[in-house]
Image: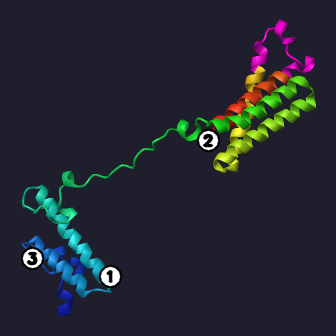
Amino acid sequence: MLDETQLQPTMSDQTPYEKLGVAESASFEEIQSTRDRLLREYAGDLKKCSEVEASYDSVLMRRLKLRQEGKIKVPDGIRFAEKTPSSLPKLAMPPLPSGSWMTDTFARPSLLEWVVPTVVGLVLATLVALNPLPATVQFVGGMATGSTLYAIYRKDRNLGRSVLFGLLGLILGYVIGVGLWGLIPNEFRSVVPGGAQALSVVVTWVVCLVLWLTALFVK
């Protein structure tokens, strides 16, 4: 035979109103007051407080549904869950970055920043023109790359970024130099110093030029 306690509704069978201990006709002020009183009463009991909050939210959501159906009128100054979706505050989108990848990567150098890379570039280009030997070409290419890495590293103290742009400048200069050599007519190639090393001289000049621009304009 069933015990009387087994015939009573369990907590899970109760409506949110019953869990809060308020009538369905209760005003929002009464519901809010009951919720605050229960939270004070169960202070320290996280499970009980969570149940109270869940019941309170369920009541508000039910009333929101009734309001949307036009069955009840709800005061404007109540908790957010009571408001219609159209009156809910809109989420603010994060501001877009002010600069593009161009402005984040390149910058106009100051007058002082022009001096050292320009002097180094001119000295190296002249050295190749005066002594167009393979060893000199390799030395100048290494010096141009190293000075570019150092110039970029001084700006942002990022070694990986400096190496990346230095290698990109070296590769780009080599590709442009070889392509430029192919565009020079044969009758004008004899003007380039170096004789058999004329191709290396032209490529080295272009590499120095590209690396010079990289050192100047990369942040």
Tell me the amino acid under the disc marked 1: Lys
Residue 208 point in image, percent of width and height: 76, 30
Whether residue 62 is visible to the viewer of this picture, yes or no, is yes
**Whole-percent x and y of residue 10?**
22, 83
Q: Residue at x 78, y 12 (%)?
A: 184
Question: Is 201 positioned to the left or the right of 31 in the image?
Answer: right
Q: Per the image, is 185 magenta?
A: yes
Boundaries of the magenta span = 179-199
Judging by the rendered image, the residue that carries numbered circle 1 is 47
Around disc 2, counting alpha carbons within 10 Å, would you say few (fewer than 14), some (14 to 19), or many (20 or more)?
Answer: many
Q: Quadrant of the N terminus?
A: bottom left
Mark 3: few/some/many CA within 10 Å (<14, 14-19, 20+): few
Give the percent coordinates (x, y) of residue 204.
Answer: 81, 27
Q: Which residue is the site of mark 3?
A: 23
Q: Residue at x 16, y 60 (%)?
A: 65
> Is residue 10 at least partly visible in the picture?
no
**Which residue: 19% across, 66% down?**
79
Task: Give the mark toward the camera: 2 or 1.
Answer: 2
The quarter holding residue 52 reads bottom left
Mark positioned earlier in the residue sequence (3 or 2): 3
Q: Nearer the viewer, residue 146 or 89?
A: 146
